[in-house]
Amino acid sequence: MNLPFPDVQVAGIRDWGEAELLIDCGVKFLGFPLRLPVHKEDISEEDARDVISRLPAGVFGVLITYLDSAESIIELSDYLGVGHIQLHGPIDFAELVKLKNAKPRSFIIKSLVVRQTGTENLFAEAEKFETIVDAFITDTHDPTTGADGATGLTHDWEISKQLVNNSRKPVILAGGLDHSNVHAAIDFVRPSGVDSHTGVEDSSGFKDRDKVSAFVARSISAFGSAKVILPTKVQLSQIERAIDSRTINCGPRVGTITLDLRSVRFIEVSALVALVSFIEWRSSRALRTILLLPENKSVRDFMRLWGFHDAVKDCTGYPFSYFCTDEDIDKFFGENKVIKNFTYNNALSKVQGQLINDRFFSISTYPINRRYAGETITTVETERWKGPLIKEFLAMNLEGMQGAGLVSSRIVFEAMTNAIRHPGATLIIAASFCENKIDREKKRLTITFWDNGQSMIDTIGSALLAGRNVRSSGAERERNYVFDVRMNRVSGEQIFELATDIELSKDAERYVLFLACLFPGVSRDIERKSFIPSQEVINEEIEITEPGYGLTYLLNCAIDVFKGSVKFRTGNISAEISTAEDGRVSRYSARIEEHAGDWATFNGNLLTVELLIGGAL
């Protein structure tokens, strides 16, 4: 995000005196409606330009207009000197693309007009434009005047709530808001921002100081803040429990969340990546996250060596210092001048120590370019795992044939291509970790992948809802097998078997949709629009070159070959897949938990592969 998000905005500024009043009341986003088809402008373009030029640092002017051509919007926004552009009229998608390409650092807000009927069209419009705009703002249609916005009318908040829940871009709530209803509106709709125009004006049409102050104060109060204290040992489940204990929802807006890591003495690499995903989700909706860094130096060294600070910057666009206290920043970047002073590394082999010093295991962030994602991202990450040093390390420690080759072609390649295929994904993270404790009989190599795209569950579910075939014609019956499923629900644990040739339908439960992603031959990509077979696997002449076998062969490699496990966090599901217990007819054991807490819906898809390793570390 290149520009800050308008959390509390007031529109309809008439002159510099009114702008000063709003700034004094704490308003940082001032809207200037210009070139309107219905309402009369509150201010001329010349005067608006003068007011905007006088705004202090940290206060932003927002162009509000019904213009529908990229050229005219660019001309007016450049004249005014604004980066925030709020579009309230009908506009072609192609014109928006032109606008964004011409002004990539702009913050584009698209209105969604809420009417008494036609909500299906409203949701379709949001889905269409969410790939190009930075945010949406609701409008209320006045059937009497034909005006959209600045009507002083509220609309059905249930519709706005559905927009917030469905949209991958933040939604600003507008329409008849004032100091008397904004708190209730935020509580119910849970938007990422609010906007008022006529609701903070007096009878003469000028801004009322008392109304503006009350509107700002009640908005900030409704958005609120919270503090989450993480335990000494942090796994993904501990993060979720800590957040749930503070009744914080990953979906609704909480203005500021402080994540207190000061007592942390150990954090898993998958949990570190999950923290990045949490911060990225909140930052994409302009929600502030403050980090209180660990007091334990070895944990800080781990975060430094693994590039946590770089990953946060790469995923959010904000420098790491934005999320930390000044004291922590001085300590984080000031206490180690050379890598030999890091206290993290002990009891390491020469090879593993060199890999860590070279930052091989650290977090790698890949922005997805839709044109080249399959050709470049997978190649870069897969080729890293073919390097001579990692090959030597894997040969020393992995028990199984062709260890290095299988890890790169069956695990890394398939995990990356799986992430790329998720609709809406703009980022992929890859990270790994090798335990170095000498007192553990069984040690693990952990490889973690995260993308911020649509959940695997929803990807398959959407295809079934659309009536599409999700099972490859090459999925012969003899390739099917049975999962030994253990479900953790509020009602207690359930244990049952699930065959992979089960009939899949749009009414299937979410855990079935999740497991279906792992079934042989099941894929939403049957038409091969984004199918990318690994060259090594093509050379082996095995069936993974058919759609729907990537995750199946990933499981086969991690579990059957290397006796490890694969963990998933996606949608409302946590799952661990491992080999079935001795004596069971099942091939794999699937331990699944359905989340019903406040952070039930995970941001994207997190896949963690754990491989048992041997040999001398």
Image (tube, rainbow, N blue to C red):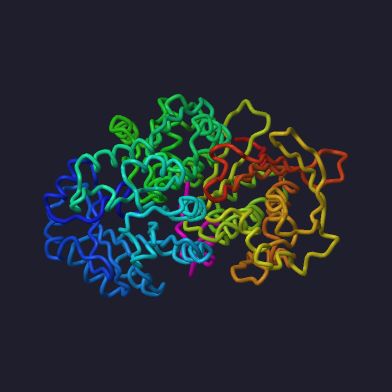
Which of these two is toward me, 449 or 508?
Answer: 508
Total numbered labels: 0
> Does 574 sit above or below residue 103?
above
Q: Quadrant of the N terminus?
A: bottom left
Q: Quadrant of the C terminus?
A: top right
Q: Is 58 colored magenta in this rendering?
A: no
Q: Which quarter of the picture shows residue 70? A: bottom left
Residue 376 makes an appearance in the image: no
Q: Which quarter of the picture shows residue 434? A: top right
> Does 576 sit above or below residue 124?
above
Which of these two is toward me, 8 or 402?
Answer: 8
**Left or right, 350 with reference to 482:** left
Q: Position of residue 184 (x, y in %)?
A: 41, 40
Q: Which residues are magenta?
A: 363-382
**Left or right, 468 with reference to 455:** right
Residue found 38% across the figure and 35% down from its top = 224
> Does 58 sit above or below residue 463?
above
Residue found 47% across the figure and 61% down from its top = 116
Q: Position of residue 592 (x, y in %)?
A: 69, 41
Q: Position of residue 83 (x, y in %)?
A: 26, 60
Residue found 25% across the figure and 42% down from its top = 211
Q: Is 378 colored magenta in this rendering?
A: yes
Which of these two is toward me, 586 or 544?
Answer: 586
Q: Position of residue 194 (x, y in %)?
A: 35, 48
Residue 145 makes an appearance in the image: yes
Which of these two is toward me, 145 or 277?
Answer: 145
